[in-house]
Image (cartoon, rainbow, N blue to C red):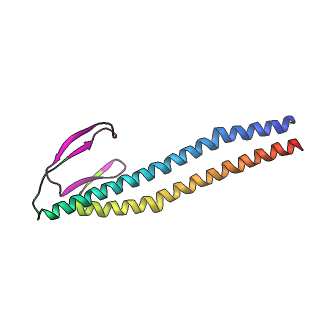
C-alpha cells in the first residue's frame, strides 16, 4: 500500500472510530432514553386510569392509597400513603412537577406521549439513521481504498 493511500485509510479509520461511532452511540442512547420516557408515561397513565376506576367504584368516598415511592432513581423506595388520591403531581419537564386531578393528568400524559412520539422520538430516530448512513458510507470508502490498493 502506498504511503498517501495508507495515510488516507488511517485517517478515515480514525474518523470512524473517534467521531462517527461515538456520535452514533450518543444518538442511539438519546433515542432509547426517549423510548423509556414514553414507557414511563404510559405506565403512569395506566396506573392513574386504575386509580380513577377504583375511586369511581367507591362512589366518591376518598380512600387513602398505600404505595411505594421511588426516592432515588429506582434504587431506593419507601412506603407512602396518599391521603387525597384525587390529585397527583406529574413531572412536566425541565425538573418541574405540576399538580393535576387524575383526569387532567391522564389528558396531559396523552398529550406528552404524542409529543414525545411524533416530535422528539421521530427526530432522534432520524439523527441516528443519518449517522448510521455516514458510518456505512465511510466504511464503504475504506473498502474502496483497499480495493484500489490491491489493483
**Looking at the image, is 127 positioned above or below residue 19?**
below
User: Which x, y percent locates residue 114?
Assistant: 41, 63
Q: Does 127 sit left or right of 32 as displayed?
A: right
Q: Does 51 sit left or right of 113 as displayed?
A: left
Residue 80 within the magenta-colored segment of the rendering:
yes
By secondary structure, the bulk of the magenta-drawn segment is best described as strand
User: Which x, y percent locates residue 28?
Assistant: 53, 48
Q: Does 47 sit left or right of 80 as displayed?
A: right
User: Which x, y percent locates residue 12?
Assistant: 73, 41
User: Which x, y percent locates residue 87?
Assistant: 20, 56
Q: Nearer the viewer, residue 121 or 42?
A: 42
Query: On the image, which quarter does residue 149 sit in?
Result: top right
Q: Nearer the viewer, residue 138 or 53?
A: 53
Residue 59 within the magenta-colored segment of the rendering:
no
Residue at x 11%, y 57% (from the top left corner): 62
How many numbered circles does the render carry?
Answer: 0
Q: Does 9 sit left or right of 33 as displayed?
A: right
**Looking at the image, is 134 positioned above or below residue 3?**
below
For the C terminus, the quadrant is top right
**Looking at the image, is 50 positioned above or below residue 134?**
below
Q: Nearer the viewer, residue 141 or 67?
A: 67
Q: Nearer the viewer, residue 134 or 44?
A: 44
Q: Which residues are magenta?
A: 67-96
For the N terminus, the quadrant is top right
Residue at x 30%, y 58% (from the top left corner): 46
Residue at x 54%, y 55% (from the top left corner): 125
Residue furthest to the right in view is: 151
Residue at x 83%, y 39% (from the top left corner): 5
Amino acid at each position: 500500500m502506498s504511503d498517501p493511500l495508507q495515510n488516507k485509510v488511517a485517517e478515515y479509520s480514525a474518523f470512524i472510530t473517534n467521531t462517527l461511532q461515538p456520535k452514533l452511540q450518543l444518538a442511539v442512547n438519546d433515542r432509547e432514553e426517549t423510548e423509556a420516557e414514553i414507557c414511563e408515561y404510559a405506565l403512569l397513565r395506566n396506573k392513574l386510569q386504575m386509580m380513577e376506576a377504583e375511586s369511581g367504584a367507591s362512589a366518591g368516598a376518598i380512600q387513602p392509597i398505600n404505595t411505594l415511592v421511588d426516592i432515588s432513581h429506582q434504587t431506593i423506595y419507601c412506603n407512602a400513603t396518599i391521603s387525597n388520591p384525587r390529585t397527583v403531581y406529574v413531572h412536566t419537564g425541565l425538573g418541574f412537577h405540576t399538580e393535576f386531578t387524575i383526569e387532567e393528568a391522564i389528558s396531559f400524559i396523552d398529550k406528552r406521549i404524542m409529543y414525545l412520539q411524533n416530535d422528539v422520538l421521530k427526530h432522534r430516530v432520524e439523527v441516528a439513521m443519518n449517522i448510521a448512513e455516514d458510518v456505512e458510507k465511510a466504511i464503504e470508502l475504506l473498502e474502496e481504498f483497499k480495493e484500489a490498493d490491491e489493483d
